[in-house]
Amino acid sequence: MAQDSAPNIIPVVLAGGVGSRLWPVSRSFFPKQFQKLLGEHSFLQATLLRAAAITSSAPILVCNEEHRFLVAQQCREVDQQWGQLILEPEGRSSAPAIALAAWAAVAQDPDAVLLVLPSDHLVGDLELFAQSVQQAAKGARDGGLVTFGVTPERAETGYGYIQVADAQAGLQAVTSFVEKPTEDLAREYVDAGNFLWNSGMFVLGAQTYLNELAEYQPEMASCTKQAMADAQSDMDFMRPGPSFLDSPADSIDYAVMEKTSRAQVLPVQFTWNDIGSWSAIWDESARDDDGNHLEGDVVAVNTHNSYVRAGERLVGIIGVDNLVVVETTDAVLVADRDQVQDVKQIVQRLSETKRSEHLYHREVFRPWGSYEGIAEGDRYQVKCIKVEPGATLSLQMHHHRSEHWIVVQGTARVTREDEVFTLGENESTYIPRGAKHRLENPGRLPLELIEVQVGPYLGEDDIERFEDVYGR
């Protein structure tokens, strides 16, 4: 397929969201779009590669500020350069996010056509997808706001639906949008034959979208316009101005598509799945003769139609059917496969009780590497810290804890007040409470060390930064 087959179509990749229904693998600070749950690439990386195969235009990415280094790292892993990487200070749903990208696009090209892609969808049949994008782009250039409609394969209650005049025809006006239905209604829609799944992917003229947004959501249009006018560049990122937080929060479907007369749908033939739950992962996973997908160290006896994922430990499962079992270092999910849409209720309870298992994995990724909790008590905490070659932590100080560092692999350059010295394998040092300090990896191999923290308060917010190459 020619790389420049659609050079003037700009991909817009929406990389926000927390994917709570895929807990405990997906968590707020490392959500599903960055996870490699189906193959060698994360969902974000697969989306970027799909877009790059059909257009040579660099994508505009919109993501949460907290995920900026994850997005940048994952782009670099698959050698994909972005045109703009826009940071939302707070998620406001898809309509304002697309507006930010549209304002950025029209500033460069008033006739820009956007291909809006959520970063967590699975799309097959790339040739058919490319053909569909080209057909939709024709409609967008004629003033339509085009979405893709997917022929339903089953009575799915987790998707929205689009009613059309003829599901076998080509590009056409939308008859109506229908929200996620009950199972009985979903079955009626499938039997009727003129309802399509709402894919949540769009092809639209950037200026056309902004005009319709101004018509139906003038406050959102005004706030996002001002936010981009006040945007500041920060390293490789673009930070919209504070007006963005004044914008109403709404999806593009509610804000524009259900109101505008320009809404069009293109029935498509490529395969599509919105990976929103563990049942969707099971649908897309290879299964054995018993209907099971077993991943990791799993022993299953008399088990059928189940998804079992062992992350760190042996998982044994006996005499069950239709289950989802997902094990990680600090949490285990066991659910009926037909009720996994309700996993978000567990996440909500964790949030309400102020636990951290919905926010972080035990291994927490940072722009310089990662750290993993090993043990903790009333006045101590032990972590394994990994620093990438050439990476540098901030010059910082802690008010409530001291730290002991023991190098187990690689070389560490340590700044402690006015001292700068090097530690090798099996060497250690002590950082007193209140001392300014910095950790660097000057070598070509990863640095790994054990950190023992001691003090009355060991929270991650006990950091006062003085210098930081990552702008935190």
Image: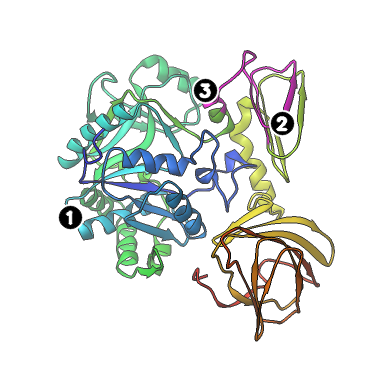
x then y, percent, for residue 177:
35, 33
- Label annotation for residue 110: 1
Q: Which residue is mark 3?
A: 183
Where is residue 142 shown, x and y percent of the image?
14, 40
Q: Is residue 294 magenta?
A: yes
Q: Mark 3 or mark 2, which is nearer the start of the sequence?
A: 3
For marks 1 and 3 on the same chain, the one whose residue lies earlier in the sequence: 1
Regarding residue 401, the answer to whether it shows in the image is: no
Image vertical order of residue 50 relative to residue 371, above or below: above
Q: Residues within 10 Å of mark 3 (few under 14, many from 20)?
A: few
Foreground of the two, 188 or 342: 342
Above or below for 168 versus 1: above
For the residue pair 436 and 173, the one nearer the viewer reads as: 436
Question: Which one is closest to the eye, mark 1 or mark 2?
Answer: 2
Left or right: 51 with respect to 23? left
Could you give the CA–CA distance between mark 1 and mark 3, rounded to whole angstroms? Answer: 44 Å
Asked if residue 188 lies in the magenta stretch, the reply is no
Query: Where does the magenta region start and end?
Result: 282-310
Per the image, label 2 sits on a secondary structure element best described as: loop
Q: Tell me which numbered mark, 1 or 2, is placed earlier along the sequence.
A: 1
Say what amino acid the circle numbered 3 marks: Glu
Answer few, some or many: residues within 10 Å of disc 2's Cα (few below 14, many 20 plus, some between 14 and 19).
some
Mark 2 and mark 1 in contact (Cβ < 8 Å)?
no
> Residue at left 20%, top 46%?
8
Residue identified by numbered label 2: 297
